[in-house]
Image (cartoon, rainbow, N blue to C red):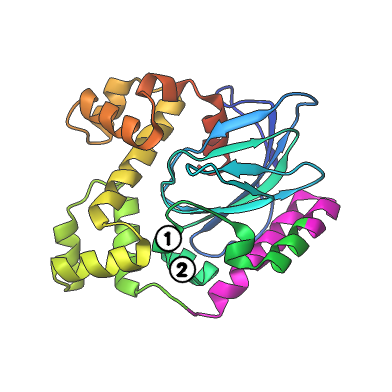
Amino acid sequence: MPIESNGWADDRWEIAQPSRMRMPTGVSIAGFRDRRVVGHTDIPVLPRPAVTIVLGFGERDVAVHDTDGREHRGGVVGGLAPSGARIRGAGIGCVELRLSPAVARAALGVPVRELAGVSSAGDVLGPRTVDDVRERMSDARSWDERFRMALHLVARRIDQDHHRTDDEVTWVWNRISAHRGRVRIESLADEIGWSRKRLWSRFHDQIGLSPKYAARLIRFDHAAAQLITGQAPALVAAACGYSDQSHLHRDVRWFAGTTPTTLATRSDWAVDLLAHP
């Protein structure tokens, strides 16, 4: 089901979402294809509160460059809030899965804390498995076929019930997300009957971030969405619970490496927001 840009996203991209498909809890999926005949894509990765799997298909590879100068081709796994990574390529097509960190551990079979940056999808999911899925996606006739192939990679692992995140940790993550980062972590520890120290330890071990940093990332994600869709920085700062506009500016600088004004003009980031609202 191709979707339109609504005027604020970069319309050189074809964006697709599944038409009728039952999604595992904590998983979203979208497809992207560069419509340009000529030109080169070079997009800085915008941190999101999710683990991301990108699987390229077609004759032209997706390449992701990390902060250490390494290039990962064809398929990548990005951890929570990777900084400095860039997506590059020309005429590329890919399927992108977004996993809540509460299910990513089960889906990938590795602790989320080990996915802090960018890794080759083959290193995480197995090179033969990834190569087979990418080849079959290249031959597929529809986006939904590609989505089913990509989903099978993670859904079968989630169903096996290995490496599950503690119910209490999942509940805390979901509460932080539901409140868009504006919640007292100490109150959540009290609600699940854990000490603050135990919550910090278990949450960091299974999610890869401290609860407070996770709340900060989720609040930034909500603020970035409002900025990209045209809201004024002062209004965004007030709506998202920042103490003032300077506080918002510091968080945008920390996570995105830019200013709120510049963030609002990045149509390539708007594409990602449109695909995974």
Q: Residue at x 33, y 52 (%)?
A: 178
Say few, some or many: other residues with alpha carbon within 10 Å of mark 1 (under 14 / 14 to 19 / 20 or more): many
What's the mark number on residue 101? 1
- Relative depth, front residue between 135 and 118: 118
Q: Which residue does the numbered mark 2 point to in the structure image?
A: 105
| As drawn, 250 above or below 156 | above
Tell me if residue 169 is in the magenta stretch. no
Rendering quarter of residue 122: bottom right
Q: Does any portion of residue 22 appear in the rendered image?
A: no
Q: Position of residue 77 (x, y in %)?
A: 55, 55
**SS class of the residue under badge 1?**
helix
Q: Position of residue 210 (x, y in %)?
A: 26, 57
- Relative depth, front residue between 217 and 19: 217
Residue 81 shown left or right of residue 155 in the figure: left
- Relative depth, front residue between 260 and 182: 260
Give the amino acid type for the residue marked by disc 2 in the picture. Arg
Residue 58 shown left or right of residue 252 in the figure: right
